Every structure is written in structure tokens, then in C-alpha cells.
Amino acid sequence: MRDIKGIKNIAVIGGGIMGRGIAQVFLMAGFQKVVIYDIISEVLDDALKKIKIGLDKSKKKGLIEERSVNSYMKKLFKETNFSLAIIDADFIIEAVTEDIKIKLSLYEILGKFAPNHTIFASNTSTIKVTDLAEVSKRR
């Protein structure tokens, strides 16, 4: 089992509803850097706006402090360049469309290009994670 204490940099693949929610949770958990990747720039712009709204709501509920919203947003990066999104990721979670061909293709690419130490995770609800691991050639 891998020691997860060294995880600092997170990459979220997919900027839709689930991806942006996952990114917000990682920010609020205190990770050093959270990159949210999508192929559509407008999706990322919307994701950042919605994450800011979510953080503001958390502030109003007293879950986080005022200064925290700005500090969290400084740790959030949007990226449309796949290589740059994953270059220093310690942990990658994908939240792409629930299409087996897309997910398998993504994990094959991740297996080839993500840093060797990177942990992969999936937001899938219908695809076997062992199938994703197999194409990534990572355990």
C-alpha cells in the first residue's frame, strides 16, 4: 500500500458537475495544488465560477473563513493542455463521461504519461476499475 502523506498535487480530469465538485473538495481538504482539466475552455471557466460560488456558500455557512476562499482559489488551476495538467500530479481522478471507450483510452494515456508515482482514481459507477487499471498498465 502506498503512503498517501506525500500527496500534494491533484489533477481532476473533466470539468463538468462532478469534476468541479471533486476539485472543490480537494481544495477544501488543503491540498497544495488542484488542476482541473477539460478539452473545452468554457467548461473550465464555468467550473471555476461554480467552485468560487461553492466556496462562498461554505464561507457563509461558517465552514471556512473569508480569507480561505481566496487562498483556495489561488491553489486552483484550469488547464486545457493534458500534458501540463498531469505533469506533476501525485493523484489523478477522472470524472469524464461514462463511456467505456473514452475512459479506457484515457487510462491508457495516463499509464504512459503520468508520473510513475501517481495514483489513479475514477469517478465511474458502471465500469470495472480493474479494466481501467489493466489498460493503464499500472496496479
Image (tube, grey):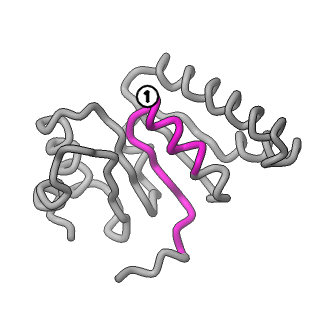
Task: From the top left corner, tell me how far across and down residue 77 is, in percent.
Answer: 58, 39
Q: Nearer the viewer, residue 77 or 120?
A: 120
Is residue 14 found inside the magenta-colored segment of the image? Answer: yes
* Quadrant location of the N terminus in the rendered image: bottom left
Q: Nearer the viewer, residue 44 or 128?
A: 128
Q: Which residues are magenta?
A: 6-25
Q: Nearer the viewer, residue 99 or 109?
A: 99
Residue that protrudes farthest toward the right in the picture: 66
* Quadrant location of the C terminus in the rendered image: bottom left
Residue 134 falls in which quadrant of the image?
bottom left
Task: From the top left corner, tell me how far across and down residue 132 is, in percent.
Answer: 17, 54
- Residue position marked by numbered label 1 in the rendering: 16
The residue under the point 36% across, 70% down is 117
Task: From the top left corner, tell me how far across and down residue 42 is, in percent.
Answer: 49, 16
Residue 91 falls in which quadrant of the image?
bottom left
The residue under the point 44% across, 36% down is 18
